[in-house]
Image (cartoon, rainbow, N blue to C red):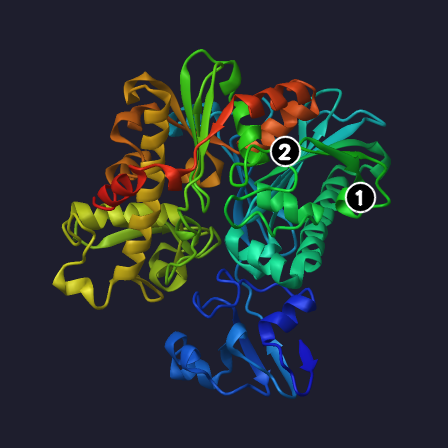
Amino acid sequence: MIIDRSKQQKNLLEMLQEKNEYISAPCNGNGICGKCIVQYKRGATEPTRRDREVFSEKQLEDGYRLACQSYPAGAYEVEIPESEETIEVLSEWGKQQKMDAEGLTEADTQTPAEAKTSGGIQDKETAEGTAEKTENALYGICIDIGTTTLAALLVNLETEADCQTAVSVNHQRAYGSDVLSRISASNSGKKWEIQRCIRQDLQKLIRELLQKEKITEQQIQRIVIAGNTTMCHLLRGFSCETLGVAPFLPVDLSWMEGSAADFLGMKELDTKVVILPGISAFVGADIMAGIAKMNMHRSEGYHLLLDIGTNGEMVLGNCGHMYVTSTSAGPAFEGGNISCGMAGIPGVISHVFMEETGKAGFQVIGETDGENKKQQAIGICGTGMIDLVYELREHQMIDEHGTYSDLYFDTGYELAEKVKFTQNDIREIQMAKAAIRAGVDILVKKAGIAFDEVDDCYLAGGFGTKIDITKAAGIGLIPKELEMKTIPVGNTVLAGTKEVLLGKISKEELEKIQTMADVINLAEENDFEELYLSYMDF
């Protein structure tokens, strides 16, 4: 890309955002994450101190810079290295997909036996594109707006079969990896830029579904959308001024209906669009969809639903009452604030184990040649981090407080040439897992029950599906008492929105769940801080 602007007051990251050029910026351009990497082909700016901390001398000579630190003054040409355009996204109830830069997908389905072995739960329809097609059939679309990734599902309204799926990175990551960063970006004058960004992503997914199934816009009857409260606000173009500061007041948490033109900017689509209701500023429509799919509001026994992500949303309840909260786990499990952390893309370490030699072995996403794994590995994702920390503690390379032994304290533990897990990285994992674990304890206490009275613990999302439950319990992320009751349940957002799409869950039921939900503000709980600090240890 060639840019020519003299007397430029904006940094290169801001310029790229204005041009709709995607570049990952988990810290929203604050110079912290070191991931908004560009390569100048000509006209490179002088390296900043932060550039010198991130890049080697050779890389600096080759024109590598951080976009947020670079203030161009004349004409130059830059290249954005491809990084997160190929990412693993759980797009169905028990199905994993990989999305590449062209939007093509490859399904990685499980047999029922494999699902039982791994603890996954599946629907009857899991094979993409195998549903029997009828001429002039009518369809609906379910959409999951995640903070990091997006997924869409095309459903035949007559047969109720899943027909096609489409997945993508949420390109709002250019404005920060977590909801607070995006709230800040929206409030600083980028609200419409961010709305345009998510609309373009969703339009692309919808068109991909139509193309793959070879159907027309006229055959789409309904679209049902769910996401966390911030994602829904950004899609609607609502103000986020009161969303990110106490007392955290959303503009609208209700069931929203409108046209595709109004909600998605798609005038060519004469379709009703529904956005599911949320529960609070940090427990949104995505969790509502999960509650609905798991029938928690209809169950006599207590069930716990966990979404282990940046916001750490969780629900404990039954047909009588729901206790809901979110905890600031931070973006560590999604690769944010970790020196070598990345989302689930090819080349990233997804699982770690100790070999007989006493050295760590690992699995790489998209691995093709086992001999070259150390060269192939470019980072580590959340599931790999949990495995690694568990193994480091088991083999006494870190102590119960998470402190490295003298051998690794200064340098960190090297997994591969480009992957070193530092002392600070371990601290980030400790803070994330302590926040989630303390939140679970508070909910159980609020319900007035013991852990043995919890029937099941559901882990939602792709992260929950790939996680090693034994190791997660081993580091204290999941309560030991719930280890054998923990079930990965896949993408409950798409599955829940499908229930609504097909009329199996009504608007009235979801609104009843809203009234059943008791929102717990962990900051106001006297024992949260004490629990949080106690769960920092391993």
Side of 347 where 393 appears, left or right: left
Q: Residues within 10 Å of mark 2 (few under 14, many from 20)?
A: some
Provide the residue designation for mark 1: 262
Side of 479 where 511 appears, left or right: right
Q: Which image quarter holds the C terminus? A: top left
Q: Is 210 rendered above or below residue 301?
A: below
Identify the amino acid type marked 2: Glu
Q: Position of residue 165 (x, y in %)?
A: 64, 38
Q: Residues within 10 Å of mark 1 (few under 14, many from 20)?
A: few
Provide the residue designation for mark 2: 128
Q: Looking at the image, do the residues carrying marks 1 and 2 touch, with CB atoms under 8 Å apart?
A: no
Q: Residue at x 80, y 24 (%)?
A: 134
Q: Position of residue 375 (x, y in %)?
A: 37, 64
Q: Position of residue 379 (x, y in %)?
A: 40, 59
Q: State which quadrant residue 317 falls in.
A: top left
Which of these two is toward me, 64 or 373? 64
Q: CA distance from mark 1 to mark 2?
A: 30 Å
Side of 269 where 94 appears, left or right: left
Q: Is 407 rendered above or below residue 478?
A: below
Label 2 sits on a secondary structure element that is loop
Identify the amino acid type marked 1: Asp
Which of these two is toward me, 24 or 297? 297
Q: Is residue 130 visible?
A: no
Which of these two is toward me, 467 or 239? 239
Q: Is residue 300 visible?
A: yes
Q: Is 297 rendered above or below residue 307?
A: above
Q: Residue at x 53, y 29 (%)?
A: 290
Which circle, 1 or 2, is nearer the viewer? 1
